[in-house]
Amino acid sequence: MLRQFGLPEAVLARKPSELAAFAAPAVLEALHSQAVRLAVANALEWLAAPGRSLITLADDTYPRMLLEIADPPPVLYAHGRIELLQRAALAVVGSRNATAQGAANAESFARALSNAGLTIVSGLALGIDAAAHRGGLAGASSTVAVLGTGADLVYPRRNAELAAQIAQRGLLISEFALGTAATTHSFPRRNRLISGLARGCLVVEAALASGSLITARAAADQGREVFALPGSIHSPLSKGCHALIKSGAKLVESAEDVLSELSGFRPSGYAATTVATPPAEAAGLLAHMGHDPVDVGSLCSRAGMSAEQVSSELLRLELDGRVTALPGGLYQRLEKGHRG
């Protein structure tokens, strides 16, 4: 219809008989239905509040990057700083069930890259997405959250406070009509927008069946760069990243690894450097932990300590933020002070 008649106003001004070749009769009848009138009234009421916008393909504020993908949404509901849609961006995604180290990596990389001039795009999910948004907000270039629901809903509810912060200092967007609840189909669909808005996609922790790999595949299909953080060979949450690296994704160890691959983008003023991990205390338990999950028995053998001594030292290190407890009685070292 748009190709035939031009802008939406021109389409809606046509007689139903002229539009019959483009849509089923039921669809054309719906344009004038009570349900549509109520939906329009609801949208206008939502738009009356400060900071809310409706962006269409015909608007200058429509993100240029989305015009490059195969199926750009005709409408975007936006809450927050719509100018962020015109800025250079990087998608940062990963597991909902992230490890403490994975979340720390996502937040530190996102903060460094945001300070380097890249707006951080993610999907407001628990785990890596939430950490990436926090890092983006902490940096200079903020963050964009692409929702799998209507823009008037927050899912999951545990991220309601984070969503409010993004609406205030970043941007929430959705292609779904107001009131659209979360479904199993809406999140894979929105993933193409997360990658489409960005110059590249960084995956931080992902299982082989992770939805983050859908975003990475969409990024590759859209001609975007794909990056992945490697992890422990024993962690299920590293296998998706390792599979991406095997198939051609760029292995990332620092923010500079990302910045150097983005052609045409220059970091703005801020040097996104990494902070080296502090050296392990030679005589302490940390020196025997390595970087993979480990149980108490193995630490007793490595360090020559009793189970009571190991447990006491693990508690001290956990309180100090140097170690995290994992399911199954395992413990893992955290890279304290790492900024990505």
Image (cartoon, grey):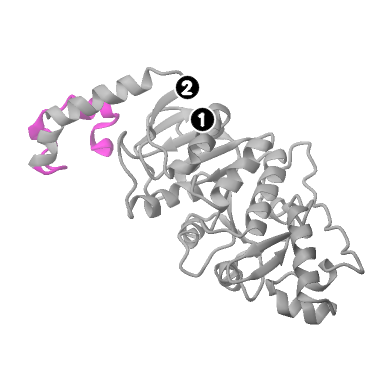
Q: Secondary structure at mark 1?
A: helix
Q: Residue lying farthest right?
A: 282
Q: Position of residue 169 (x, y in %)?
A: 58, 29
Is 242 positioned to the left or the right of 301 in the image?
left
Residue 282 is situated, as x and y percent measured from the top left of the image, at 92, 68
Q: Is residue 11 magenta?
A: yes
Question: Label 1: few (<14), some or many (≥20) within 10 Å?
Answer: many
Decide which of tag 2 and tag 1 comes sooner along the chain: 2
- The picture quadrant where one finds residue 98 is bottom right
Kindly indicate the quadrant of the structure image that contains residue 238. Answer: bottom right
Q: Is residue 144 above or below residue 246?
A: above
Q: Residue at x 48, y 54 (%)?
A: 222
Q: Residue sitting at 63 percent across and 76 percent down?
A: 234
Which of these two is toward me, 39 or 97? 97
Circle 2 residue: 51
| Mark 1 lies on residue | 167
The numbered disc on residue 148 is none
Disc 1 residue type (three-letter): Ala
Is 91 or 162 nearer to us in this picture?
Answer: 162
Cα distance in 3D space between marks 2 and 1: 8 Å
Q: Measured from the top left, where is residue 28 in percent x and y?
A: 12, 36
Q: Which residues are magenta?
A: 1-24
SS for tag 2? loop
Looking at the image, do the residues carrying marks 2 and 1 touch, with CB atoms under 8 Å apart?
yes
* Front residue of 7 and 166: 166
In the image, residue 142 lies in the stretch drawn in magenta: no
Pick out the residue farthest to the front: 308
Tell me what residue is drawn at x 9 percent, y 32 percent: 16
